[in-house]
Amino acid sequence: MTDDELFADDIPHPADSASADQSSGAVPGPFDGDRGERGPSPFAEGLNPDQLDAVVHESGPLLVIAGAGSGKTRVLTHRIAHLIHMGVHPSKILAITFTNKAAAEMRERVGALVGPVVKTMWVSTFHSACVRILRAHGDLLGYPRQFSIYDSADSNRLTGYVIRDLGLDSKRFTPRGVHGIISLWKNELVDPEEAQRRAQNIFDRKHADVYAEYQARLLKAGAMDFDDLLTNTVKLFREHPEVLEHYRQRFEHILVDEYQDTNQAQNEMVLLLADGHRNVCVVGDTDQCLPPGTLVDGPDGSTPIEEVAIGDVVWGAGGRRHRQAGTVVHVHEGRYDGHLVELTIDGRRLRATPHHLVPARLVPQQDQWLVYLMYRADRGWRIGRTVGARPRREGKLQHGLLVRTNQEHADAAWILRVCASMAEAAYFESIFSAEYGLPTACFHDAGRALAMDDAWLRQLYRSIDTETRAKLLMEDRLLHREFPHHRPQNGARRSSINLTMFSDCRSKVGYHRVQWSSNRDDVSAALRAGGVELRSSKHKSLRYETSWKDYGQALADVKRVAEIGGLDVRRRLAHDGTTYDLVPISHVHPGMEMLVRDGDDWIAASVGTVEFVPYSGPVYDLEVDVTHTYAADGVLVHNSVYKFRGADFRNIIDFEEAFPDVTTVILDQNYRSTQTILDAANAVIDNNVERKPKSLWTDSG
């Protein structure tokens, strides 16, 4: 891969000297040497107080938590322009985004504010910034300055050669699967030596052997793969402090967008660069969900989502069969680069980003076979297969995944693939197991005639790092750990609390029920110690149950109780006597049921096909009061303010620990919303207990 391909829409490489072009005169005042008082910033006009605080922040670490539609791109571009206005030379500003298109857009917006001097800035992705650094200093690590860059096809091909030359079985050690493990190690800054030290069994050691030989061949070829661009830059900074100091001096201000999406290598790179001057601004953001052209249904017909406005009335659900009107109180436009989930259902087609929440339910089907990923806390992760439905004694069908989870005493299970036959399921069970190195052995031998007894099964799961392999598999399949397709209500190790929208139909739009019931003394004791009032229930169990008219308050309550009791939260939606799980759309499979519009009613329909299609462009979402749902291309979806986002917020926590004196600015004001729904969103913007709290407010009404 050439640098031109990698940099694509990125900016030209600026000169290494900070004395790059200063002749345009587009930015008022001289650079560097003169940093005295300058009058009001011309870039503060039109900003709300929170945005202004972030833009004019003088120095030191700055963390910006951005609510949907809160203008974080405007904050970033205006902050850069303000820094230049205050005398910071553009060449001393490093702005990092995640895509070349985002970098080009930021450069264009900053250029509109400050003029041609923007060309001397580094506005780039992590990878392109690393290439520039390694082109200048890679020889210190033993690489030529004009090293080659291997794309994924090159990397998988080289991995295959190493597997072959080491005499490994390519069916057990597939190039893509092994390279996926290597990539995961690199993103976590685990080098080949550390991988060998971590190896717990022969399987792990073989992966580490491939990793070591793979890296040796890359170095011999004068090449790096995409992950090396990050890890080698961190290695360069750690092993050559003079290089790190050079770039600390070079970049007086660092700004990073989408910080919650950084991996450990990217996070470490930022922390190392910023540890000197400590002038670093990072922004955490949320993704939005539906592409333009998605039709939103209302009393006046269907409207493309990009044309929907605040105050429009749209059709949603309220718990009963009949459609329910809701009012749009927030419209957000964002940008998305990645794969959309495209599903067909009852003649309709819906496309959405993978994490968008939709109501869906598993339906037992005897003509289906399922390949699943299963988890048990005291064992680990395994791959398995089961028939889609099993008959019960009373003649009813029970879902096969539920039966297998109970048989295995498992804590949770995720469907990987729906198959038409046992043979197809056996094939994909073997493929997933071989590619990701996950066992297919049962978790226990009680009541079974297995080749391995329980002692050997325990040893098997102790010997394999199933956690890392399962993480890679879930990332590849766009699965979220927080949303299993099935988990027991009261498992031996974990207990769940339910939040069911519209469960209490005492009004047109049903109230939202929070409910927990169990005979587990440890959970009950923790809840009571935390001030949760429990009542007696059947079968000598205790329960907690409340109903809330306000959805935001219901979410806040379920989060409070879950944190006190160490409970998993299961979010659901009740409709016409049937309960649907709220799941990311990437978890939907053929044969599952969703809700579609049929005239004035919502009816259940079976999902036909599910595909993943590449997409780059604008995306939109709505917040609807009071239904919190709307019809997208005739299919019922949940709204964005309450969706789950599968980002790793530990990096933001690490940032705060690295910079205890960080200034945190929360972009509370959503300048295209009304206050009604934002009040409800304040306490419930996320489900992740590690997430930063944030509230939303508006002047719009």
Image (spheres, rainbow, N blue to C red):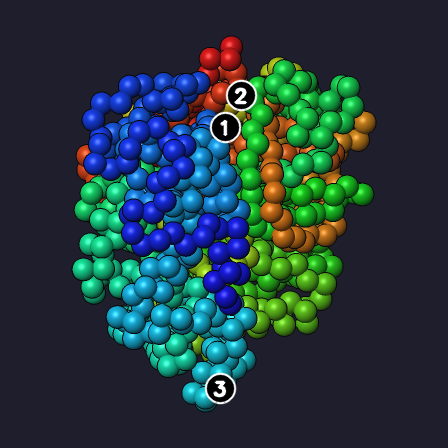
**Residue 318 x, y percent position in the rendering:** 64, 23
Q: Distance between the residues labelled 3 and 1?
A: 51 Å
Instruction: Name above or below for residue 464 compared with residue 694.
Output: below
Query: Residue 467 lies in what quarter of the image?
Result: bottom left
Q: Residue furthest front?
A: 23
Give the secondary structure at mark 2. Answer: loop
Instruction: Name above or below for residue 233 compared with residue 538.
Output: below
**Residue 421 x, y percent position in the rendering:** 71, 66
Q: How crowded is mark 2: few (under 14 residues within 10 Å), some or many (20 or more)?
A: some
Quick check: can you spot residue 654?
no
**Residue 465 x, y percent position in the rendering:** 37, 67
> In the rendered view, does 435 fall on the left or right side of 665?
right
Q: Which residue is depicted at the point 63% across and 15% down? A: 311
Give the secondary structure at mark 3. Answer: helix
Instruction: Name above or below for residue 442 compared with residue 414.
Output: below
**Residue 389 x, y percent position in the rendering:** 67, 55
Give the secondary structure at mark 1. Answer: loop
Q: Mark 2 points at which residue?
A: 672
> In the rendered view, does 608 fall on the left or right side of 475?
right
Q: Which residue is depicted at the point 71% across and 36% down? A: 293
Q: Distance between the residues labelled 3 and 2?
A: 57 Å
Q: How many labels does the image show?
A: 3
Q: Mark 3 points at which residue?
A: 164
Q: What residue type is labelled 1?
A: Gly
Q: Which residue is depicted at the point 70% across and 42% down? A: 350
Q: Name the residue under label 1.
A: 69
Q: What residue type is labelled 2?
A: Arg
Say if mark 2 contacts mark 1, CB within 8 Å.
Answer: yes
